[in-house]
Amino acid sequence: MAKHSDTSWKQDHPSTLFSNSVQKADRAVKQAMSHPQEIAVEHAFNSIEHAENAFQNAVQVNEHMDTVEQNKEFLEQAKQQLNEVKEIVEEQ
């Protein structure tokens, strides 16, 4: 795939990176919910951390803030769900 600029698409489109990261984190949380194991929870936490970093990048460039805010709310819900799963795993 040819590059369309000298910088990566991650730098060109931080809101897209954030959106994709939130989707990945959501899938990881759902995986942890359906298979509550320590490794799945750890993977989901890593995905959420990556999404939070992508959020900070999107905020810094002030790009598509309406979409960024919607994704941030979705990410917060995923974090709450993951914390519930973490409690279940810790009880086992």
Image (cartoon, rainbow, N blue to C red):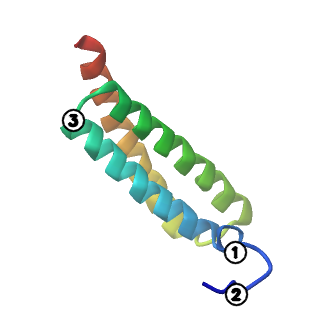
Q: Residue at x 63, y 73 (%)?
A: 13
Tag 3's secondary structure?
A: loop
The reply, left or right, for residue 64 in relation to residue 90 is right
**Which element is circle 1 on?**
helix
Asked whether the residues under the numbered discs 1 and 2 touch, taking CB atoms below 8 Å apart as contact, a structural biologist would say: yes
- Of all residues, the one furthest to the top in this rendering is 91
Q: Position of residue 73 (x, y in %)?
A: 43, 52
54 left or right of 33?
right
CA–CA distance in space, label 3 to label 1: 36 Å
Kind of residue sitting beneath label 1: Asp
Q: CA distance from mark 2 to mark 3?
A: 40 Å
> Where on the picture, by quarter, is residue 29?
top left
Whether residues under marks 2 and 3 lie with C-beta atoms below 8 angstroms apart, the answer is: no
Q: Earlier in the sequence, mark 2 or mark 3?
A: 2
The amino acid marked with disc number 3 is: His
Q: What percent of the width, then of the height, locates residue 77?
A: 35, 44
Q: In this view of the protein, which residue sits in the foreground, 18 or 68? A: 18
Residue placed at 39% from the left, 53% from the top?
Answer: 74
Q: Residue furthest left?
A: 34
Q: Can you tell which quarter of the image residue 1 is in?
A: bottom right
Mark 3 or 1, closer to the camera: 3
Nearer to us in this view, 18 or 74 = 18
Seen in the picture, residue 64 relative to 71 is either above or below; the reply is: below
* Residue ID for mark 1: 12
Asked if the residue at tag 1 contacts the one at tag 3, i.e. Cβ–Cβ closer than 8 Å, the answer is no
Q: Which residue is mark 3?
A: 35
The crowding category of the residue bearing disc 3, from other C-alpha atoms within 10 Å (few below 14, some 14 to 19, many at least 20), is some
Identify the residue position indicated by label 2 in the image. Answer: 4
What residue is at 23 percent from the left and 37 percent from the top?
Answer: 33
